[in-house]
Amino acid sequence: MFVHSCRVMRQAERSAIEKGDVSSASLMQCAIDRAVGVLHRDAQFADASRRFYCAIVYAGKGNNAGDAIGIARALGFERILLRCAAEPEVMSVETRKQLELIPPGHLIITREKPRIEAEGALLIDGMLGSGASGDLRQEYAALVQELNSLRAASRRSITLAIDIPTGLLADTGVSCAYSVQADATLAIGCVKPGMLADGVEDIVGRLLCVPLPEADPGKSELLVADDSLLQLLPKRAYSCFKNQVGKVRILAGSPGFIGAACMASEAALHAGAGLVELYCPEGIYPILTVKAAPEVMVHGVRDFSEVPTQDVQALLIGPGLGPLQPREAAAMQKLWLEANCPVVLDADALNAIAVHRLRLPQHAILTPHPGEMRRLFPESAELTRAQTATRFVAKNACTLLLKGARSIITDGVRTCYNSSGGPFMATGGQGDVLAGVVAALAAGGLSCFHSAALGAFLCGRAAERVWALRGFPQSVPATSLFPHLTSIV
């Protein structure tokens, strides 16, 4: 899904209505239907009407309220509590129509703070949409605080914001004195720039992209990864064999860090690599021959210069290598400069670049976390994450995957924000798995940019599935992602 300002999105909606392609009421219904489709496919919301005893809708008087009410009804809730900032009689025409569609006995309009039962509730923010500006009026500020207090008091309850959380300015990312703290936000038609600003991740939560082709605002230079990226996964010919789907060669591991080598190599297997070779320091070779997945071919080397660069479709260098001496760093640089294939540089390869001022290979994919990024690019301390990514790539021709709560992928021409995953991925080893997945996708023929963007999305989506299957735990171990990495159903 592309990123557009509120003005562009409103113009697209207005144009579709003026052309007679769709009415305002039918456009709202299209948005509701598509939003519910997205929610039914999402791990956290797929079974919402059975998981939660009710939906509590916080509504304003505009069309954002209509979307929220319609979504609660279409999800199948038989108990919908409506907490209004205004009397239903003054709501928009389209919103009143959505109220009329709720079956008799399913709607309760309350003028007091609801009490949440033990099962938890789905809290839906439909107060103010993306067109809101300025600070909140008193009645809205009070409702925002009330909604947030319900979420905080009930661990089983979650908040879903429609289009944008109330209190967050859509184009700038400026937060009002009070803002809804959403667990997830449905971005309808496009993602607004303010939803990607630094520091708003805890307001927006997970981004769920809802396409609205009836009012398509078109393409832009900024993209948010969604399910459409899955189309990049190549369909294999029935007659294909292992040498046709990519060989990945990995240089990883050191005493005390064999797990990184194991996870990166096994992730490459599960992400579709036909062959995976793991080169490691000679001293840990006996351990890795036992610990690595049986499908991985393990080779011990005394020196990085012994690692061949021919007959391979992607190199991955860095996970768990540990600090490198100047001679080792020089040998590693020679290795990747001689390689005629995409080279994924992660972890200690990135630290070596920063410490020893190494040159980047021609087809480099760098996967730093924020700390590694600061070492690579010290001026990033004064920049936003987006500025850091674009300026680094402008100075260093490469594809950058800057990891974080909303990972940024850019090659200097295209920029993509990842939308999958969540705080349950804050656990060791996730970066090693990601590096292996990106290397496998590059070996399979995808461009460096698409390998990085799709790799980040697949890892986040796999983690979401594990999270749901295990009952929404605090964290998801990195190795649990393996069976789900390229599943598209």
Image (tube, rainbow, N blue to C red):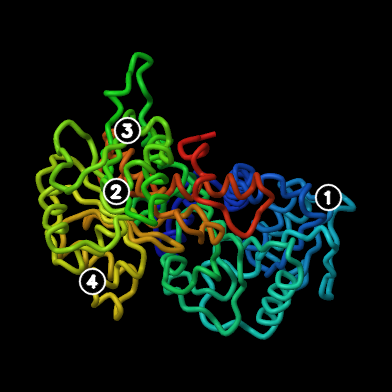
Task: Tell me how far mark 4 sits from mark 2, CA to CA.
Answer: 33 Å
Task: Tell me how far mark 4 sits from mark 1, CA to CA.
Answer: 54 Å
Pointer 4 and pointer 1: residues touching (CB < 8 Å)? no
- The residue that disc 4 covers is 377
Looking at the image, residue 316 lies above or below residue 269: below
Bin the neighbour count of mark 2 within 10 Å (Cα to Cα): few under 14, some 14-19, many 20 and up: few
Residue drawn at the location 28% of the way across and 45% of the way down: 280
Pointer 3 and pointer 2: residues touching (CB < 8 Å)? no
Residue drawn at the location 50% of the way across and 68% of the way down: 201
Residue 283 numbered tag: 2
Image side of residue 78 versus residue 151, left or right? right
Indicate which label's residue lies in the foreground, 4 or 2: 2
Q: Can see residue 55?
A: yes
Pointer 4 and pointer 2: residues touching (CB < 8 Å)? no
x then y, percent, for residue 223? 37, 54
x then y, percent, for residue 394? 17, 63
Nearest the viewer among 489 and 18 is: 489
Image side of residue 257 versus residue 105, left or right? left
x then y, percent, for residue 218? 37, 50
Occupied quadrant, residue 403: bottom left
Looking at the image, residue 333 lies above or below residue 113: above
Q: Amino acid at mark 2?
A: Gly
Indicate which label's residue lies in the foreground, 1 or 3: 3
Residue 297 numbered tag: 3
Q: Amino acid at mark 1?
A: Glu
